[in-house]
Image (tube, rainbow, N blue to C red):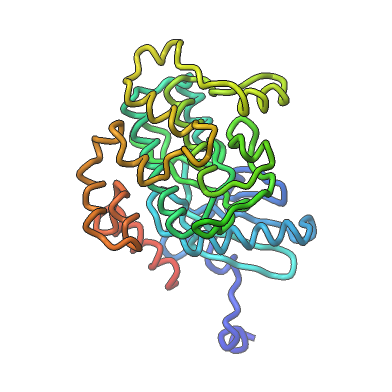
Amino acid sequence: MEAIKNVIGYSNMFDYYTIKETLGKGKFGLVKLAVHKKSGKKVAIKIMSKKEMQPSDVELQRREIEVLKMCQHPHIIRLLDIFENQDYIYIVMEYLPGGDLFSYLEKRAFTLTEDRARELSHQLATAIYYLHSFGIAHRDLKPENILMSEDTEKGDVKIVDFGLSKILGPSQTSIDPFGTLSYVAPEVLLQKPYGKEIDVWSLGVITYLMLAKVLPFDDEDEKEIARQTIQDSVDFNFSPWEERSAASKEVARLMLEKNRHKRPNLEELLNMEWFNKYKSVNERSKQMADSLKFKAYALTTPDSPKLKQEIDDVRSMQSD
């Protein structure tokens, strides 16, 4: 049997990982903490039961896997391994102990300094720019789909959950009604064609929340949230906006532009005044080919010691 397994490339997830406690529960299964037996590295394993999934659910999951296979960015969760048998799909990802961004903000009473909000917003913007460079629209960006590398002021954001993502060409649009109310763009609610700029809107909502401690459009009634999103102007006339810079208001205002054609793309956004702190990083992009431009926008570039170590860790685990 061992010889046959070697010939056909058979592998059992339990041969490589020791399963630990449950980290969370999803619609189709659990997310478990696990330890790679040889390296001792902690990972998170998403375990999904095929019996509980409809064919459309399996398709969404396979879409997420394909997107994660493409992504190598410091602010997008890393896919480490995949196992599958007749009953289950096991997705092995990097372990992020900081929890999701909503919990991170909640623990801090939704109060961040402007500099910290700018840092997290910039990290998200670089990751979305990376996705859009490959033609990928996430379509469900929200704090619950953003994990923190650690629960400290040094924690970085990592975008997760690509089940609703879609590949769109440069001028291609979609009318699929995907997204989460309070974070979804008005064109989606109006069932009008939309493109990758819906992610810019969602980033605008998240940035507004980090700066203002409240959502730009919110109510107990879902219909009222939808009405506000479609019709109401963004309000900046209250505290803590009074203490925020004019540049931060301008970024939030432009990202929350209701006309999708007037909304800035990620390159325009990253070159705005509010992100001048990272200007030296952004300027390097002008010297690079378009296909490599996203590398210059990442705070942690591929030649940094931190990312090199992360890549080496992944390669070590995969070779085992």
Q: Quadrant of residue 307?
A: bottom left
Residue 104: percent from the left, percent from the top?
Answer: 48, 30
User: Residue visible at 35% across and 57% down?
Assistant: 310
Report whether residue 18 is seen: no
Q: Is residue 316 above or below residue 301?
A: below
- Which quarter of the image is occupied by the N terminus? bottom right
> Is residue 299 visible to the viewer in this orientation of the structure?
yes
Residue under the image location 52 percent in, 30 percent down? 103
User: Which of the two residues, 268 or 157, is positioned nearer the viewer here?
Assistant: 268
Tell me what residue is drawn at x 54 percent, y 32 percent: 258
From the viewer's side, name the closer residue of 269 and 242. 269
Say whether residue 278 is left or right of residue 222: left
Q: Is residue 248 left or right of residue 21?
A: left
Q: Position of residue 266 (x, y in %)?
A: 40, 45
Q: Specify the quadrant of the image occupied by residue 111.
A: top left
Quarter in which the C terminus is drawn = bottom left
**Number of labelled discs?**
0
Of residue 222 and residue 210, the one placed in the foreground of this image is 222
Q: Position of residue 181 (x, y in %)?
A: 65, 33
State which quadrant residue 84 falls in: bottom right
Q: In the figure, is residue 35 to the left or right of 243? A: right
Which residue occupies 30% across, 31% down?
274
In this rendering, is residue 184 above or below 304? above
